[in-house]
Image (tube, coloured by chain):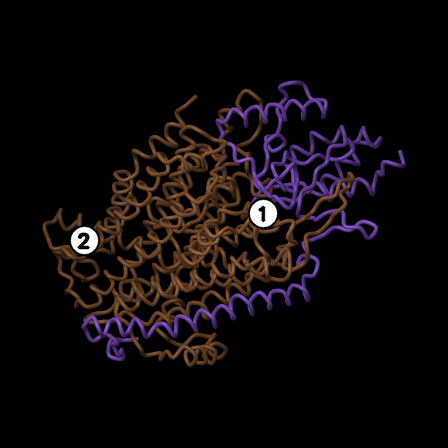
Amino acid sequence: MMLARWLEYLAFLAIVVALAKPAGLYLARVFEGQPTWLDPVLRPVESLIYAVLGVRRGDEMSAGVYFCSFALFSLLGALALFALLMLQMALPAGPADKYLTTPMTPDLALNTAISFATTTTWQAYAGESTMRYLSQAVGLVSQNFLAGGAGLAVGVAFIRGLARTHSPTIGNFWVDLVRAVLWVLLPIALVGGVILMWQGVPMNFAGYTQAHTLEGPSQTIAQGPVAALELIKNLGTNGGGFFNVNGAHPYENPTPLVGFLALLAIAVLPASLTVTFGQMTGRPRAGWVLLGAMVALFVGGLAVCDQAEAARPEHLAALHLVGGNMEGKETRFGVADSVLTAVVTSNGATGSYDAMHDSFEPLGVMVPLVNMLLGEIIFGGLGTGIYGIVMIALVAVFLGGLMIGRTPAYLGKRVTASETKLVALYMLLTPLVVMCLSAIALVAKDGLAGIGTNPGPHGLTEVIYAYASSMANNGQTMASLNANSLFYNATTGVAMLAGRFGLAGLALALAGRFAAQGRLATTSGALPSDTVSFGVLVLAVVIIVGALNFFPALALGPVVEALQR
Amino acid sequence: MSDAETTPLSSGGWVSLLLQIAAQQRPALLGLILLTLITGAAYPAVLLGVGRLFFPGQADGSLVFRSGVVVGSRLIGQGFSRPEYFQPRPSAAGSGYDATQSSGANLAPANPKLIEQVRQAAVAYRKLNGLAAGAPTPIDAVTSSGSGLDPDISPQNAALQVARVAKARGVGAALVRQLVAENTRGPDLGFIGASRVSVLSLNLALDRAAPMSAR
């Protein structure tokens, strides 16, 4: 059993690592404007779009203008989605009004709009009882593409900051966005969407089906254009599901194969961005070192989560049951797929869980929680993961510089006081937002009201989980937290905005500073950033920073719960 | 793009910066509209067309028909309580297998409510299948699934129900065991996911091979 589970885990990792190089080199070609085999089809479309937008390919932006373009585009997207959701009851096609039992209140609509425009896709609603088909197919599907593509653009611009010398600019947001959507997301989503339909994911605008079950009672089955959302929600590292239970729903994930492909869609592009990073900066080994650190952390989390979930549930020990923790898990996935999905989605800033994390063992659910608190650096979100892990590397460079008594430098870029300040702000923003909002929720009446069926340390974990998920733009939830209230809609919205624009703003500011620098010649006294020992230093920084920031909170939540008998 | 080819927009000064930012309004607005049309209208439309053409059954939700009537979906679990049918897992979707309200129970592992629910389910399962109190029971039989719509049970769970179903239908256990085997799938590609038995297709096969009226 254990062997079979690890076979699946290692096969997954092997595929991700094997695809990282070809995918990473392809991304580098796309964003450096070099020829690709899709050009004959896409170049004319691209030119047409630029003509309409009034953008010229060679136009370049400073980091500030790049960030403002990104923010403007995201906020306009959020506004448009908000408007669509507020007007959704006027939209044609199903589902019938009687099934839409959750009212689309302004606070829910705003929370959802922010959520999808920031790739968080946190959902305070159940899709099948809240959303019109067209709200999902047009509003949510397009924001899955566009927010995902915008994130990728920012990640690439960040890489350019380290790749360029004496440059006042870091690329053009509109060019990067259009190329991300046309060359990367659309082709994969088209092929993947067809595979998903073949495997059984529905794609229709029919009303809910009335079935006459074998034993007599009728069963109403929710339908919808599920396949349109299913692949891009993972590829864009968004993760918001079509139905309430997201990837656990048999229409969203009809077979384990679909689930496995979904996980590859989440992890491959972010992992391959380390190769893109190495390629564009001319230091391929530095990219591989970052990927190595990611893989090590990934395996560590997997081992802990697997151990917790595969063991016989302790609290049910008296009942003579056979098997691991299957509460909240689907038979076709079993423990292995559920654990792998929890680890990949929490690392990949993607909320598309396929098992109920609220019913995970305390140490099992601590793994996705820690993954989110660390800031999505293990593969991470599309484009956002690369600057997350480079920020950690910069802290490692700083610490290493202190140890050897030299001005720290990374890839020949000096990390002076002002760069270090930006890195420090970046590292502090997540604990600041998550811990402050959690603290507020735990003293506010409206915050405590969200903790429903699971009181005690488990309830505390649910609250921290919600804000960690929002801040990390992940979107997954421990679902018994009742999050559709004005309080949670507002506070998680704040965390999502901080996680998206606060972190990206700091990353781009840093990229702008690096781009303006020259490049130091490598000397024998400098700390090399492409060795195994540097990789170990990066790992140490992740653990030290993570522990310093979050150990007290984790101790009161999952750790206490695990120790309780 | 190399440094030499770039034509910087930025040339310093707050006024110039604000002007540059203001100039992004047009691409932002038109880009949003155009890209929304491509990804939110054209893309779903293409998938809809491909689905209609090549995978009509799946696109419509893998519905199962018997004598021209929809009896359910191959992918969506439904409730069974009679002894002559294989029983699915406990469901937390609505009042049970409500396919308009997918949901797990979302109870914490130490929650007394969960422990009590599972205990009762174990007692009922053992009683129904003629097992001794405290007989080892597959955990999937007594825990609720993530979706509340799990269409499958584990092969171990199915095996324990064979004798009861065979008795209720007045047929040999060998026939029932064979039908279970025919409706069992191993892990996808041999290593992805778990072995499972599809409850609805198994029960449909039973109704065909050993109809209740023929007893």
Q: Residue furthest left?
A: A405
Residue B170 at x, y percent in the picture: 84, 30
Residue sitting nearer the eye, B114 or B128: B114
Looking at the image, which residue is at 44% across and 52% down?
A111
Specify the label residue B94 is tagged with.
none
* Residue type for callout 2: Lys
Looking at the image, which residue is at 46% across and 43% down?
A485
Q: Can you tell which chain is drawn purple?
A: B
- In this view, the mark in front (1 or 2): 2
Residue A480 at x, y percent in the picture: 49, 37
Relative to residue B110, is residue A156 depicted above or below? below
Specify the label residue B190 is tagged with.
1
Q: Quadrant of residue B212?
A: top right
Relative to residue B143, is residue A225 depicted above or below? below
Looking at the image, which residue is at 38% across and 44% down?
A467
Residue sitting nearer the eye, B158 or A105: A105
* Residue type for callout 1: Gly
Whether residue A302 is visible: yes
Relative to residue A35, is residue A331 depicted above or below? above
Chain A: its colour in the image is brown
- How far separated are the C-alphas under marks 1 and 2? 51 Å
Looking at the image, which residue is at 67% across and 40% down?
B197
Residue sitting nearer the eye, B164 or B100: B100
Whether residue A289 is visible: no
| Dot 1 alpha-carbon crowd within 10 angstroms: few under 14, some 14 to 19, many 20 or more | few
The residue pinned by badge 2 equals A421
> Quick one: SS at disc 1?
loop
